[in-house]
Amino acid sequence: MSRNPFRFDKPTRPEHYVERNPTVEQLVSDLCDWDGDSFGLVGGRRFGKSSLLRALESCLAKRLELAGDESIHVLPVSISLESLHLLEPASIFGFMVHRLRVLTSGTKKAGRVVESPLVELGLPEYAQKISPPATLQELEHTVEEIVIAAKSILGTLRVVFLIDEIDGIIDFPWTDQFFGNLRSLIYDGEMKDFVRLILSGSGRYMDLDAQGSPLANAITGCFLEPLTETAARDLIGRASGIDERVADEILKQTGGHPFIIQHILHYLHKDGSTTTTVASVQAEDRRFCYDRSADLENWWRGIGKDGQHVYCILRRFREWMTLADVIHLANNHDIQVDRGLKALCNHGIAVHDEFYQKYRINGQLFLDWSRTRCQTLRSSFTGSAAQARSNSLSFQEAAVKRSALSRTGIDPNQYQLALVTALPKEFAAVEVMLDQRQDIEIPGDPVLYTVGIIGPHAVVATVLPKMGNNLAVAVSSNLLRSFPNIREIIMVGIAGGVPNTKSVEDHVRLGDIVISMDAGVIQFDLGKLEQITRKGKATGKHFTIRASDPPPSARLQQAVRRLEARRVRQERPWQQYIALGTVLEDAARPPESTDIVYDSREPAIIVPHPEDQKRLPGQPKIHYGSIGSSNTLLREPVSRDLLRDEYRIKAIEMEGSGIATASWMKGTVEYLLVRGICDYCDTHKNKVWQGYAAAVAAAYVRALIEAIPVPLNSAGPKES
């Protein structure tokens, strides 16, 4: 019998690796670019990460051996943490130094039995067999020595450390410090331009990043997913006796999971049959569930609580579902649905469409195996009102209910919360946060409305025909007449931020959220302009703001403080809703490199952001304080800074004062402003961050409304 080419128990040999070649090629291209990034490979256990690292190492080594006229030569250094007997920072840095020495010292040896250098740099032989401990500084010194030695022989040399099984070191007391050292190595250390990292793990270290790990903003995530149909069929096509019908069955059962495909093909080849049937594939599925039950259990644990709950929802309906659909059906604020979906895709048991808007389960084998797990999970929530509602309302039934709602009349008296926006992109972000939304028109009112539900509350939303405080007053007044029981209006949308690079706590950045607390809104174009005289002569003018707007809603401010208390407990319910808004046009979070603060008086000079250890990379920071409002667009940073210093203003917009005025005129209505920051009110103002800023503001408002309890005598919104 010929040698079995399907070795599921070992990484694929580089010369046989084709499954994810486009990913390898893209990584190589980026690593050889002077401005290229470091990467974190994320995928479930036995999902091909080690094979990809080996293929990447081989590709870089061949490129280095050819040593053409590239501007940068890349030296791959493979680091397997599993090979270390003692896991501590000194041992890891020592092993990195050791591997670097082995690959660059002495001369190449033909027909080598032991590892010899990848490149000859004229450095003396390195005879050390065991790696001694080392510090970060010693590692940087070794990199510098090798880069200098390579300069006259090769040119510019960059070292890339390929570190596998990084998850194995995240539960130690020294983990944060070690990740901080890695960040320094590639981000702000002396050799940062000459070192890159490729970290490989199941995603737990990326979860640490989401909690504020210092390594987060220094690496770019590369999330592995199931093989494409083309790649999977190419792999299956290496086996003999596989017709199209059998290949279809393998794809159906595995969903393109490389490990399961290799396992099935291994035993089909081992069987020696010249003809494979669908029945034999199904038999190998059963063998897999028996032999690899530990792997299946590890995958189930690996997707975490969020992934398990989301998988059971997807499994129940077995069709394409949007993030909003899953959030609605989960109906559980403790479940981070977006995180669960990402975990499922990274383990190959769910897939998304090309726009990351819809998701469905993937792979019949795991679907069959998970039946009892999902039954157990559902039964553990028996008695929970939220879960019972989710379980009793099928996806199809929910669609029927929404359709029925659209055919019935709307009772304006049931609405107590209103959302007002100024721009279409702000309104679009609000719309995707509403469940069971419906467009309506009130007789005698020229304003158009959209009604819907957020949590237990009925909500009405609208968009102004134009920006400005005057129109905000007019539209809000109409809204309050048409919906007489409105208690609060929330103005939600974008605003200019007021940075303070001298104060970490007060520094507002692009993508952050500012909420009008305490004094609320200050209309800074309403005041008294006086002439200043000295010795009988006019020497200048002085403008005094007469801030007369009422303070924001006490009830909503209390809800904001409840959310802040949850943030202190490391809970951020608005994060999962940000993903709802960022699927909109131009609403993805822009690169951090576009977040630039310029000097107020020297607009060509860039001012660095202060280092903020509490800021979560890639997530908005929440600020509380006064918001400035005016009918005039502000693009003048000196005036912006004066408003900050004199009135502690954190954001500037053009509608908030109108909302506050309309609320005050009604007498029984209060307000709150929630603004996502899209620019710095200077001459560099542009629209790059507007879509994302609108999305984060709307996401926070959804979480805020869900945090408002229903009065004891209220049955909640009517659904029909």
Image: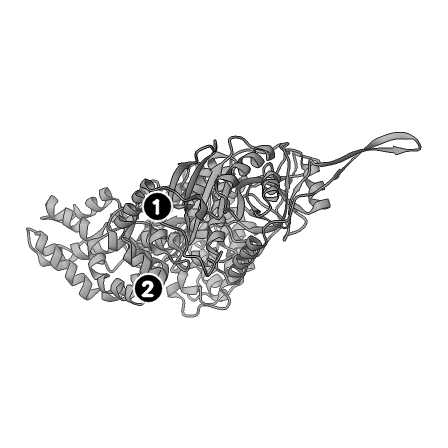
Tell me if residue 27 comes above or below residue 682 in the rendering: below
Q: Colour scheme used in the picture?
A: one colour
Q: CA distance from mark 2 to mark 1?
A: 34 Å
The dot on residue 414 is: none
Nearer to the camera, 93 or 248 = 248
602 vs 324, left or right, is right
Q: Is residue 308 in view from this perspective?
A: no
Task: Kindly identify which residue carries mark 1.
Answer: 59
* Circle 1 SS class: helix
User: Mark 2 and 1 residues: CB-CB less than 8 Å, in contact?
Assistant: no
Task: Say what amino acid the circle numbered 2 marks.
Answer: Arg
Q: Nearer the viewer, residue 107 or 135?
A: 135
**Label 2 SS:** helix
Quadrant (top left, top right, bottom left, bottom right) of the N terminus:
bottom left
- Residue 313 image offset from top left, x and y in percent: 29, 55
Residue 540 placement, left or right of 408: right
Q: Position of residue 7 (x, y in %)?
A: 21, 57
Q: Residue at x 48, y 39 (%)?
A: 482
Q: Which residue is mark 2?
A: 301
Residue 284 % position (x, y): 14, 59
Which of marks 1 and 2 precedes in the sequence?
Answer: 1
Pinpoint residue 673: horizontal percent, then vertical percent. 57, 45
Q: Is residue 642 above or below residue 625?
A: above
- Residue 345 visible in image: yes
**Left or right side of 550 for 234:** left
Identity, as a three-letter code, of the amino acid under mark 1? Cys
The residue lying at 36 percent from left, 60 percent from top is 386
Q: Nearer the viewer, residue 101 or 4?
A: 4
- Which one is in front, 50 or 526? 526
Determine the residue positioned at 53% across, 48% down: 488
